[in-house]
Amino acid sequence: MSLKQKRKGPELLCPASSLEVFKVAVIYGADAVYIGGEAFGLRAKAKNFTIDEMKEAVTFAHERDVKVYITANILAHNDDLLDAKKYFEELNDVHPDAVLIADPGMFVIAKDTLDKDIEIHISTQANNTNYGTFNFWWNMGASRVVTARELSLAEIKEIRQHIPQEMEIESFIHGAMCISYSGRCLLSNYFVGRDANRGECTHPCRWKYSVVEEKRPGEYLPVYENERGSYIFNSKDLCMIEHLPEMIDAGIDSLKIEGRMKTALYVATVARTYRKAIDDYMESPEKYRTNMPWYLDQISDCTYRQFTTGFFFGKPNEETQIYDNNTYIKGYTYLGTVGPKNADGLYFIEQKNKFSVGETIEVMRPNGDNIVVTVKQIRDEDGNPMESCPHSKQHLWIDLGIELDEYDILRREEQPEDN
């Protein structure tokens, strides 16, 4: 019996920006992972995947009964269509489980080109706000639709009651929120010529703004909330870890984590936490309620902007915005992911941030354990001892005084700044 057959409950769908992060998402509990290729995805600034990397990812995932979805969800212009058929033909060789589409023109090309056993899912970018839209896409041949983030749980539940039972609903459960309607934002294009709807968003919603009066050009008047000004478009992050029962009751089949620009530490933290929450709830609602403090503690260990429940319980109000800054709250710094062990008993890592011999750090494991350790040794690629590793992406061999497993994650707790 496969892992998926043993598991019950909704699918946990996680993001990956690179092959490294992809493997971490799989190991830390994802049922499915969504990735972008080097074309046609809405995260052009992510590292994204070559065709060969996609093939490696699909093989890695399928060996572990995990699905792979590839995004092709730009809102296409004429010149985008010229290469779309060729791209989908290449994806037939990759053989993902599904391709994610937003644009009707891209959908038609995908439907005509992709192998019949590769599903087509409809992106949230297509503004899917009612059951008529869901039924339209079902009749066109899509097997799943991602809900617009502007829907309440009551609306999603009504959609479930008016669509075929076999049709799947996917909804975001965690991650950054967009200030614009289902991501239909023109700010980035207007300010810097980078189109958010073609994968190049510069996130101007996180910038600081002032008001200029028509007859006083050059005189910038801050929109005061405090002495630092106001970030009037800056939404809190979505977090529904406390409302998993309501998500399931609404008939949602796939719970989606936002974050194809995030680090392996972020993806591992969120995947591990939601994996345990889903499994606990399906085993016993009481176990889920009892373990809620652990979920909340763990989910706050990764970077976030304070939390909101978005539109799920009605329209957001002034409490869903962050007015005084545009920075993340950061509990831990990512140091690296553990690789193979060598003949000397040392473990390989590619360093992500500086750490030193004698320093206290944590080992984060897929099973939920967080182990405090002291760095015993650091050696460079040639085996030379080092006191610290100041340069990012250094290839190192380390000894932490305990046995490690491949894909364990190393992190350092950050101390809060004094006020």
Image (cartoon, grey):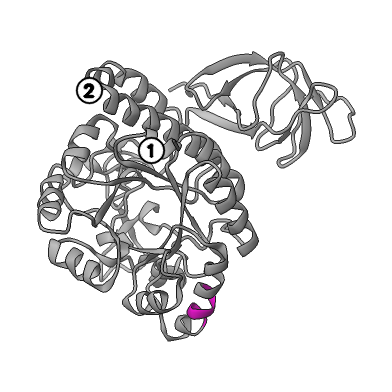
- In the picture, measured across the screen, residue 38 lies left or right of residue 279, that is right
When asked about the image quadrant of residue 6, the answer is: top left
Q: Which residues are magenta?
A: 83-87
Amino acid type assigned to the residue bearing label 2 in the image: Pro
Residue 346 percent across, percent down from the top left: 78, 24
- Whether residue 310 is in magenta: the answer is no
Q: Which residue is mark 1?
A: 5
Magenta stretch, overall SS: helix
Of discs 1 and 2, which sits in the foreground? 1
Q: Residue 315, how many percent across, how many down?
A: 14, 48
Q: Is residue 191 visible?
A: yes
The residue at the point 64 percent across, 34 percent down is: 336
Work out whether residue 329 can be spotted. Answer: no
Q: Amino acid at mark 1?
A: Gln
Residue identified by numbered label 2: 285
Vertical placement of residue 386 versus 174, above or below? above
Using the image as rendered, state which of residue 397 and residue 110 is in the foreground. 110
| Residue occupying image coordinates x 52% and y 19% | 370
